[in-house]
Image (cartoon, rainbow, N blue to C red):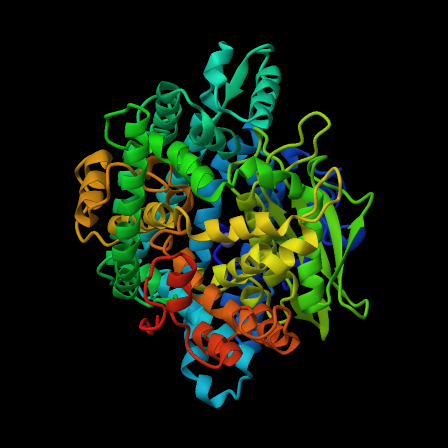
């Protein structure tokens, strides 16, 4: 997943223009005391001085930066000069430097290393940030200047990137309500403020619900079926929680998923899955009313802006363009996926019968029996693969692939400030030694980190006075921890997650455009997962596995037989995986294509949505409403955008075909991918960029084939 900034891009893209001298005088002492008010960080590669930053610095630094930004914006808006690209569009792009930087640091920490105090500050800042964003996007004087430049665009002879910057700026104003009456603007302001707060509360509730639950096991026989490493990890968790001698499982994926996969005790599997799928559903951290209110506020906002539904509003700026575009693709995939899932369910049912269980297949049975079938059919035990996937070896694999494709080199930076002892900093250079950027990597779960894996940035690439400003990128994961003397051994999925996040990181690192707001991963949601997902294909390729998958103890290269098993198993359980994903995507679309406010309770809404598509009772959507962070934890986030992963999935499998059918490290294709996709950010239309790389529009055929969802390998030629 790619974490999206809470700030409206373009609105806040700026450098110091006006009032600088005055500010310097006024805040000199403050600046000396608060490391976040210094214009340039005196650190290696300009990374944040995490060693000096304290929690209490954030609130004053961000509030001050908001003030400074407001002054810059006012100076642009109130200018008496004729509006030009330079004095309006470019000036806006350069304004708000300090705010953007400090907000990035702050929001990155509230995800990767939070605490009660930071969460309290975030709650206080949420309405301030939202108000500030509105103060800009609803500033009529400013909009009139932008509009004048927009209307004169034909006569301005703008370059490609300048024209795109102008277009994005103008559209962003209109989409933020600049054309509304004063009364409606006020309404919109209120909606945005409420959304900011509600979405923050939503995600705090999920974090709290995650941390609140533990399954404590006292009786050794309840551990039956679990691999030794999983038992050890549970014992360590128990120790951390002051329950030495017992075993504790939590709702972190790295803990709950192996339990569901291996634990023989059906009742306990039921118990933990029940807790998992009811996070935020009732109890102390209830998200029911929040979900409803968020969806309804979004509808109100869309209507106010002249759109029928929130999805119409939200999808306008994507590759899919409209709800119809999204439903068309999802429904096209749903039919073969559900058919495959039902075949898988029948197989599980047979196995349960053999175990003497007459019950229907339940969601807490699926992973357990799927694992047994996987073992029986493919004789592939995940625990057999893990010793070949030590974190260090997978990291070497990721680095190796990036070197072979793009000539990149990675070197760890010692003694650089880090925000947590587990985070490391890496310097990235070109083959010829030219500096590319730096990258933080932070791998293991902890209570202060939210679940999942994501890429984010501390500063983005741009060109200033003809010089490339290198980005500071970060990836954050929740991989299996080292236990005792055993290093971190990843599951195959985790290894691919590493490749995935690294693909996002490359998009940020290799960016080579003029303007920050158009750089790196600032592209539409259904395009942003292409660079990440495409890299997973190399991670899973037999040739590449032999490069990096080596036994952590003996150094033995992963045996061919095991690779074959991994390959064969590639299409296994894909009915399930595709269905649980598509169900969540369709649920997301259903929330955001409502034309009337939702009045029923959330369980009812979700049930109706799932009944409509005929989801089997044996599978629950990958995310249920009350913990669907992708769509409810951010005022915009992935709302009506969760489909993006499979949209990008079509792109990535089609893109990888270009290599797979020629050479895995085809330099010409790698160059074309780098030049047209990884370097271009949002400076051109995504489909045009893709076609320039591939020579044609993407086809859905490679995706269906990869997932084993098609029998016929030749007849499907439908395009996105
Ligand atoms: Zn991603």
- Position of residue 345 relative to residue 559, above or below, is above
Using the image as rendered, state which of residue 212 and residue 539 is in the foreground.
539
Q: In the figure, is residue 572 to the left or right of 302? A: right
| Picture coordinates of residue 612, whole percent (x, y) | 17, 48
Of 574 and 245, the residue lying toward us: 574
x%, y% of residue 500? 55, 53
Q: Which residue is rendered at x = 47% and y = 49% of the image? A: 569
Residue drawn where x is 40% and y is 20% of the image: 265
- x then y, percent, for residue 692: 51, 80
* Residue 121 appears in the rendering: yes
Nearer-the-camera pick, 203 or 159 = 203
Vertical position of residue 691 compared to residue 535: above or below: below
In the rendered view, does 116 fall on the left or right side of 274? right
Residue 586 in the image: above or below residue 446: below
Rendered image quadrant of residue 30: top right
Can the viewer see residue 102 in this picture? Answer: no
| Total tally of numbered discs in the picture | 0
* Residue 186 placement (x, y as % from top left): 32, 52
Looking at the figure, which quarter contains the C terminus? bottom left
**Residue 600, located in which quarter of the rendered image?**
top left
The residue lying at 50 percent from left, 22 percent from top is: 249
The reply, left or right, for residue 344 in relation to residue 251 is left
Q: Nearer the viewer, residue 149 or 333?
A: 333
At 48% from the left and 15% from the top, the residue drawn is 216
Can you say whether 659 is above or below 14 in the image?
below
């Amino acid at each position: 997943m790619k974490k999206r900034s809470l700030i409206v891009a373009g609105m806040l893209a700026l450098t110091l223009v006006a009032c600088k001298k005055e500010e310097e005088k006024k805040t000199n002492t403050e600046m000396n005391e608060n490391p976040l008010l210094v214009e340039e960080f005196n650190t290696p590669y300009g990374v944040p001085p995490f060693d000096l930053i304290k929690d209490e610095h954030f609130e004053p630094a961000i509030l001050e930066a908001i003030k400074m930004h407001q002054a810059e914006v006012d100076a642009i808006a109130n200018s008496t000069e004729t509006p030009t690209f330079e004095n309006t569009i470019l000036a806006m792009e350069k304004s708000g430097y300090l705010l953007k930087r400090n907000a990035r640091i702050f929001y990155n920490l509230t995800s990767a290393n939070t605490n009660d105090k930071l969460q309290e500050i975030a709650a206080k800042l949420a309405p301030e940030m939202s108000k500030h964003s509105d103060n800009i996007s609803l500033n009529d004087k400013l909009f009139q200047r932008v509009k004048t430049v927009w209307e004169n665009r034909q006569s301005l002879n703008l370059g490609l990137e300048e024209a795109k910057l102008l277009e994005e700026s103008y559209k962003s104003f209109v989409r933020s309500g600049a054309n509304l009456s004063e009364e409606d603007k006020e309404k919109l302001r209120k909606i945005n403020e409420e959304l900011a707060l509600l979405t923050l509360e939503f995600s705090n509730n999920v974090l709290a619900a995650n941390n609140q639950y533990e399954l404590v096991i006292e009786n050794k026989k309840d551990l039956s079926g679990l691999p030794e490493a999983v038992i050890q990890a549970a014992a360590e968790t128990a120790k951390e929680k002051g329950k030495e001698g017992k075993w504790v499982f939590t709702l972190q994926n790295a803990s709950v998923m192996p339990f569901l996969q291996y634990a023989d005790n059906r009742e306990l599997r039921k118990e933990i899955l029940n807790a998992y799928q009811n996070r935020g559903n009732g109890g102390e951290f209830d998200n029911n009313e929040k979900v409803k209110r968020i969806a309804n506020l979004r509808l109100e906002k869309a209507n106010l802006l002249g759109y029928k539904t929130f999805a119409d509003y939200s999808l306008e700026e994507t590759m899919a363009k409209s709800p119809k575009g999204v439903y068309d693709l999802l429904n096209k995939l749903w039919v073969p996926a559900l058919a495959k899932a039902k075949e898988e369910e029948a197989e599980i049912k047979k196995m349960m019968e053999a175990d003497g269980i007459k019950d229907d297949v339940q969601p807490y049975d699926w992973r357990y029996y799927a694992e047994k079938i996987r073992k029986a059919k493919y004789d592939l035990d995940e625990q057999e693969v893990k010793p070949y996937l030590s974190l260090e070896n997978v990291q070497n694999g990721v680095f190796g692939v990036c070197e072979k494709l793009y000539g990149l080199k990675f070197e760890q930076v010692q003694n650089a400030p880090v925000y947590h002892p587990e985070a490391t900093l890496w310097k990235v250079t070109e083959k010829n030694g030219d500096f590319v950027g730096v990258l933080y990597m932070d791998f293991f779960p902890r209570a202060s980190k939210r679940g999942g894996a994501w890429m984010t940035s501390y500063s983005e690439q741009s060109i200033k006075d003809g010089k490339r400003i290198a980005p500071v990128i970060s990836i954050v994961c929740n991989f299996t921890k080292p236990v005792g003397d055993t290093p971190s051994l990843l599951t195959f999925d985790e290894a691919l997650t590493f490749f995935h996040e690294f693909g996002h990181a490359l998009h940020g690192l290799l960016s080579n455009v003029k303007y920050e707001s158009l750089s790196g991963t600032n592209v539409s949601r259904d395009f942003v997962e292409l660079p990440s997902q495409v890299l997973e294909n190399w991670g899973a390729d037999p040739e590449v596995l032999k490069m990096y998958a080596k036994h952590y103890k003996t150094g033995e290269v992963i045996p061919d037989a095991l690779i074959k098993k991994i390959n064969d198993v590639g299409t296994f359980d894909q009915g399930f995986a595709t269905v649980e994903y598509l169900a969540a995507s369709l649920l997301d679309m259903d929330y955001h294509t409502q034309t009337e406010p939702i009045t029923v309770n959330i369980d009812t809404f979700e049930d109706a949505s799932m009944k409509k598509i005929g989801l089997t009772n044996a599978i629950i959507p990958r995310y249920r409403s009350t913990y669907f962070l992708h769509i409810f934890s951010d005022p915009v986030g992935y709302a009506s955008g969760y489909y993006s992963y499979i949209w990008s999935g079509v792109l990535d499998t089609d893109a990888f075909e270009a290599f797979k059918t020629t050479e895995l490290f085809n330099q010409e294709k790698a160059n074309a991918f780098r030049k047209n996709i990884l370097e271009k950010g949002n400076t051109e239309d995504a489909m045009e960029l893709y076609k320039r790389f591939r020579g044609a529009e993407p086809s859905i055929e490679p995706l269906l084939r990869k997932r084993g969802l098609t029998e016929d390998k030749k007849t499907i030629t439908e395009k996105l």
